[in-house]
Image (cartoon, rainbow, N blue to C red):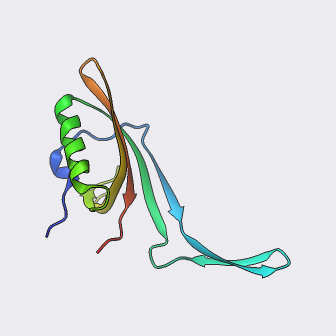
């Protein structure tokens, strides 16, 4: 089964207000006297997370909403993050289609890097 491709929808790029953060998973072991030792939790211990915002027409809003709903918050999809040369796998568990303003719709979503096989 092939991985669904969000870029194939040709939806406009997210707004510049979109932001990326990196979350690092670590393991910490307390050693006493206030000391501790930490280490990365696994081979993929740093996950990229994008908080994305778009202003879309009704057609693009409906296409993006249908795409994300079809993944049900668990199925990874391909997407090219801003500034990247190639696609990565992502999963979206949260999204919010906003209200209409002059036939344009605010839409926000959070994409988390997926390490699913």
Residue shown at 20%/29% (left/top)? 58
Q: Is residue 87 left or right of residue 21?
A: left
Q: Is residue 64 left or right of residue 92?
A: left
State the image quarter where residue 52 is shown.
Answer: top left
Residue shown at 15%/67% (left/top)? 2
Q: Is residue 27 above or below residue 22?
A: below
Q: Is residue 27 above or below residue 2?
A: below
- Residue 57 x %, y %: 22, 29
Q: Is residue 104 above or below residue 5?
A: above
Report if residue 83 is visible in the image.
no
- Residue 62 x %, y %: 19, 37
State the image quarter where residue 29 is shown.
Answer: bottom right
Report the quarter where the N terminus lies. bottom left
- Residue 75 x %, y %: 26, 62
| In the image, farthest residue toward the bottom | 31
- Residue 74 x %, y %: 31, 61
Q: Is residue 5 left or right of residue 95?
A: left
Residue shown at 54%/69% (left/top)? 25
Report the quarter where the C terminus lies. bottom left
Report if residue 70 is visible in the image.
yes
């Amino acid at each position: 089964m092939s991985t669904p491709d969000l870029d194939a929808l040709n939806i406009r790029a997210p707004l510049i207000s979109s932001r990326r953060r990196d979350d690092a998973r670590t393991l910490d072991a307390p050693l006493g006297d206030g000391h501790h030792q930490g280490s990365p939790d696994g081979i993929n211990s740093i996950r990229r997370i994008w908080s994305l915002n778009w202003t879309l027409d009704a057609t693009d809003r409906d296409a993006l909403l249908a795409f994300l709903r079809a993944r049900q918050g668990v199925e990874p999809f391909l997407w090219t993050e801003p500034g990247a040369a190639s696609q990565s796998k992502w999963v979206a568990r949260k999204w919010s289609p906003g209200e209409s303003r002059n036939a344009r719709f605010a839409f926000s979503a959070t994409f988390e890097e997926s390490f699913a096989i």
